[in-house]
Image (cartoon, coloured by chain):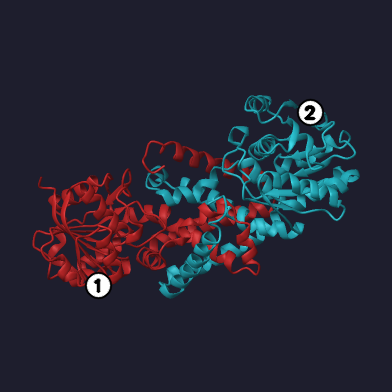
Chain colours: A red, B cyan
Amino acid sequence: MSDRIKRLAVIGVGLIGGSLALALRKAGACGEVVGCGRSRENLERAVALGVIDRFEQEPGRAVAGADMVVLGVPLGAMEAVMGRIASSLAADAVVTDVGSAKMAVADAVRRTLGGHLARFVPGHPIAGTERSGVEAAFASLFEGCSVILTPLPETEAGALARVGAMWRACGAEVVEMDIAHHDQVLAATSHLPHLLAYTLVDTLARMDDSEEIFQYAAGGFRDFTRIASSDPVMWRDICLANREAIGEMLARFSNALQDLAEAVQGGDGETLLSLFHRAKAVRDRQIKGRTLSAED
Amino acid sequence: MSDRIKRLAVIGVGLIGGSLALALRKAGACGEVVGCGRSRENLERAVALGVIDRFEQEPGRAVAGADMVVLGVPLGAMEAVMGRIASSLAADAVVTDVGSAKMAVADAVRRTLGGHLARFVPGHPIAGTERSGVEAAFASLFEGCSVILTPLPETEAGALARVGAMWRACGAEVVEMDIAHHDQVLAATSHLPHLLAYTLVDTLARMDDSEEIFQYAAGGFRDFTRIASSDPVMWRDICLANREAIGEMLARFSNALQDLAEAVQGGDGETLLSLFHRAKAVRDRQIKGRTLSAED
């Protein structure tokens, strides 16, 4: 099959990059897997865990001879990595990334991989856990998940098809989206909730009796704040890379919270009840509509 | 054993009241269980499910002859129910409740059960799920959970001991706390997170492309918003009953969110990184400190 990847280079062998490699190997959809990253220890673990066949610590060496290159590094490291692979990429190599903000990736690609735009496919698997590193990787992470591809105007159909086939081989559903729209949707569904969880935990931690407060946190609190255990560097980079859409969502949420605070203050039970009813109805419907997916 | 309950009256046979009855029966810690509530259908289900032995729809009749009375109704219905049981309580009956805001309960008790203050024990099990109704009840709900008792100055030691023994029989750990302090702690760990989840879901639902937005919500979002499926009436009542402490927490959180928004806006990666690091450290420590509890 022409879709089969002969040599996959994964730059950043963490939860996403590692799970992708595991899933592709399990599906028989790729040959050799070369890993690359800053931590030699993590790469050695990746070899020991059977996630990659071998590793290089220099991105340029890692991509040499690869027909598929996946950039799985935090957004803040993306441009530097692109710069270091630019002159080593095979002419027909397809390059994709897994970053959570696509406008920043597209801008970085234009600055560093100008000669390779036709074979660059910005991508984003809507999957993950709050854990990070190759130890957290598992082959079924993408089963039933959506992967959003946001092709550049220059991206060739063949490159897009190859990246789509790669993700489908992992059990994911592939959709295409406009870059700006992707960044808005993700600001709403992912970036904002993460920031709320981080802010909640930090707000409570700064209170005088925080030790006692956390002692009485029940299951709801722990589910609610699970994502506050996510990788801080990754989330700093997402905030910086998608600051406009995130800023807009923060403003929208803050206004709604202000309205709620006024209803609480004023003892306005009717407003509170209708807000809670609306939210519950939407939430219940969302769950119901998903019971057939693999993730629930 | 003197701690054994001869006849338990549960007013409000929902998730909490129903689970309490199931747990006490399983532990052999009570004799007859009489349920009471507005929905005859729910009470019939409760009998069919073996949660209660029989039911009454009039609270006064339900508590007649009971030596332990548990009020498991929403906070907004509490005072009316108290008024309707006042003249029917056995002189030695111990009465407790499971409301999430204790100052409001204590005020209602003083207005309605003035003659019974010595045997009233305000209580709050820190347990629950987003589901409600007797169908959601299960015997192990309280295993490993904390139950906070907030005795009135008038509460007799014997009554306090009986309620404590009842919860311990369900596998819970019982602690005592000052009423005002309870209300502050719960505003932080439970009420605020619920309001944030409701507000997030509602904010997204009001956006033009909300259907599409929810389509790309991943596991993190679903965990984060699980509590937005909670009972709207219960949460309206909690907001009204604990409005001062909730208002304070909302203000505290809004200020923190404003600081975060400024850091995002200004591209202040250092502030963002240290916030995320702090929150992650606390969150990870909280989980680690809990791995021995039954709830994880």
The quarter holding residue B188 reads bottom right
Q: Identify which amino acid the numbered label 1 is placed on.
A: Ala
Residue at figure coordinates x 70%, y 49% from the top left:
B124
Percent of width and height locating residue A286: 45, 40
Whether residue A281 sits left or right of residue A128 in the image: it is right
In the picture, the quarter occupied by the N terminus of chain A is top left
Residue visible at 76% across and 50% down? Answer: B104
Looking at the rendered structure, the secondary structure element under dot 1 is helix
Q: Nearer the viewer, residue B133 or B212?
A: B133
What is the residue that sits farthest to the front in this orientation? B1
Dot 2 alpha-carbon crowd within 10 angstroms: few under 14, some 14 to 19, many 20 or more: some
Residue position marked by numbered label 2 in the rendering: B58
Residue carrying label 1? A80
Quarter residue B58 falls in: top right
Chain identifier of the residue bearing label 1 in the image: A
- Residue drawn at the location 63% of the way across and 57% of the way down: A216
Outermost residue toward the bottom in this view: B270
Is the C terminus of chain A in the top left, top right, bottom left or bottom right quadrant? Answer: top left
Q: For residue A259, which quarter of the picture?
A: bottom right
- The amino acid sitting under disc 2 is Glu
Res A195 visible: yes
Disc 2 and disc 1: Cα gap in Å? 72 Å
Q: Residue A189 location, x and y as percent?
A: 42, 52
SS label for mark 2: loop
Q: Are marks 2 and 1 in contact (CB under 8 Å)?
A: no
Residue A266 coordinates in the image, percent (x, y): 69, 52
Say few, some or many: other residues with alpha carbon within 10 Å of mark 1 (under 14 / 14 to 19 / 20 or more): few
The chain holding disc 2 is B
User: Picture coordinates of residue A107 (x, y %)?
Assistant: 25, 65
B271 is higher (above) or lower (below) than B238: below
Taking the image as shown, residue A212 lies to the left or right of residue B207, namely right
